[in-house]
Image: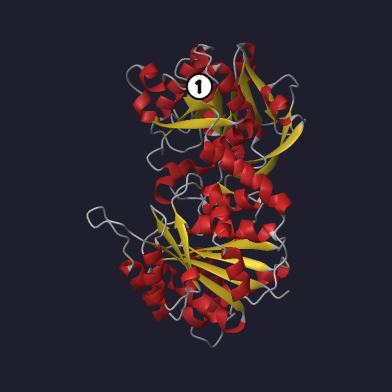
Amino acid sequence: MHTKFIVVLGSLMSGLGKGAVTSSLLKILSMYHYKVLPMKFDGYLNYDCGTMNPYRHGEVFVLDDGGEVDMDFGMYERFLDLNLTKASSITGGKLLDFILKKEREGGYLGEDVQIIPHLTDEIKSRVLSFASSNNLDFVLIEVGGTVGDMENAYFIEAMRQLAIKEDVMFIDVTYIPQLNVVGEQKTKPAQSAFHLLMSAGVMPDFIVCRAEKEIESKTRKKLALFTSLDENHIIDSSDLKTIYSLPLHFLDQGFDKLIFEKFKMKPKRIDQKELAPWRQLVEKIVSGGGKKVSIGIVGKYVHLIDSYASVKEAIIHAAATLGLDPDIKWIESEDLEKGDKSDVLNGVDGIIVPGGFGNRGIEGMINAIEYARKNSIPYLGLCLGMQLMAVEFARNACGLKGANSSEFDPSSKYKIVDLMPSQLSVKYKGASMRLGSLDTKINKKGSIMYSSYKKSVIKERHRHRYELNNKYRDILERNGLLITATTTDKKLVEALEWSGSFGIGVQSHPELKSRLKTPAPLFLSFMKAAYNRQK
């Protein structure tokens, strides 16, 4: 079968859920047993997401191959249940870097290098090479940003050109506002955005409408009339209780059949063995009938929850499997630096301290960890959360006053966490951390780690520069902080646990590999412990 391309564009505003639409279509097509993978275009001039602040762009997602990519890749992986590679990610920075290097090497001798055709040709070349090398039936291409942005105009132009010779379908994800004072859904903004796309030479085949409430029949008819589309090509994507319902919502509207019709395909049959378990898990999430468990996430980026998207989803995955109803409380770590910590943490059944960089809010995280340890509240530390677990224990259980990480206090007498020697000579910040899927050796069979994974060697994804300082291994263990996992050569600490209650910190990011059907093992153990404490 010749590869077909589905291009998902966004109009009017960012944050409408192009990633969710793309992921849902990936899921649906995979249920038909088509070979399908995503590509994501991001127009920013960063080479990748590695140096971005989560407040600017949400979570930096890390792939097995060490690629630091847009947070939408987390959604793609969670829906597809596949490990993707950085070949799926194309940024403006990568393209310009390639073009300029090629020009300096003489690759364009005699030519004046331009956006069109040189940059657009390179984009098309990468898309076609990706499809061919992976032998794909479908490529789902999400164009980041909003139609009309200068930074993604050349991506849209490249897709227009691709459609001249290839089978390409365009989907416009737009917004249908409904002002309370008016009381009706308004289509004029969506019409204007549609016409803007047409002025760029792109005629969308479908409009996916984001709205707070389901798209009304009269709204659908009006939008269809002014865009010259069939009414059934106006697809509802109104707010749902869980994002995992969206593939089912699309199937209910026959979106899959319409796509096959547009491509003039005779489709395979959808695999009910794939669809039924997904539907069952979604129903568990939607019903919320399980026992409520309150989880406090103590972080420094909680005002933008997308900064911790994978942590949130890993909790949801584990809760669905266990039949629990998670109540996530987002706690700003700076709020725990003064006053009575119990005011903020009172009532939570478990505490998570996720990853992060920089010294803002660090003391609040340490206070939360101390509160969890002393009150036997199940605790899960992720990357920074493990490092601060060691710092807290060194200060309060080992008597090492002023213990800290050299990241936050370079003058500390007790640098419990320190920069890896390999990082001392690093000049460029991008892609220079310890990144990607790496082996971890679990060395204590009675540990939380072993009971969670039930094997001695595991692989989890990493993203960090600092490590537990090996000088302090002995004193931490003598006082009761157990080192339950290391790298396979035993040179770096991968997991710490305290005794007497559920408390574990890992240097990795297990949340990045959690899926709805296969939750992260540590999150399963943590959610069980939180529920058992509640009981």
Q: What's the colour scheme?
A: secondary structure
Work out whether 449 lies above or below 162.
Answer: above
> Which residue is at a point 38% across and 19% down the rendered structure image?
341
> Which residue is at a point 48% across and 59% down the rendered structure image?
18
Q: Is residue 448 visible?
A: yes
Work out whether 534 lies above or below 317.
Answer: above
Q: Is residue 156 left or right of residue 38?
A: left
* Residue 24, picture quadrant: bottom right
Image location of residue 332, percent across then percent down: 38, 32
Q: Helix or strand or loop: what does disc 1 sit on? A: loop
Which quadrant does the N terminus fall into?
A: bottom right
Work out whether 144 lies above or below 361.
Answer: below
Mark 1 is on which residue type?
Answer: Asp
Query: Residue at label 1?
Result: 349
> Which residue is at a point 67% across and 45% down the rendered structure image?
277
Q: Is residue 415 visible?
A: no
Residue with the most extreme front position: 217
Image location of residue 157, percent across then percent down: 48, 77
Q: Nearer the viewer, residue 529 or 87?
A: 529
Image location of residue 40, percent across then percent down: 55, 62
Q: Nearer the viewer, residue 5 or 190?
A: 190
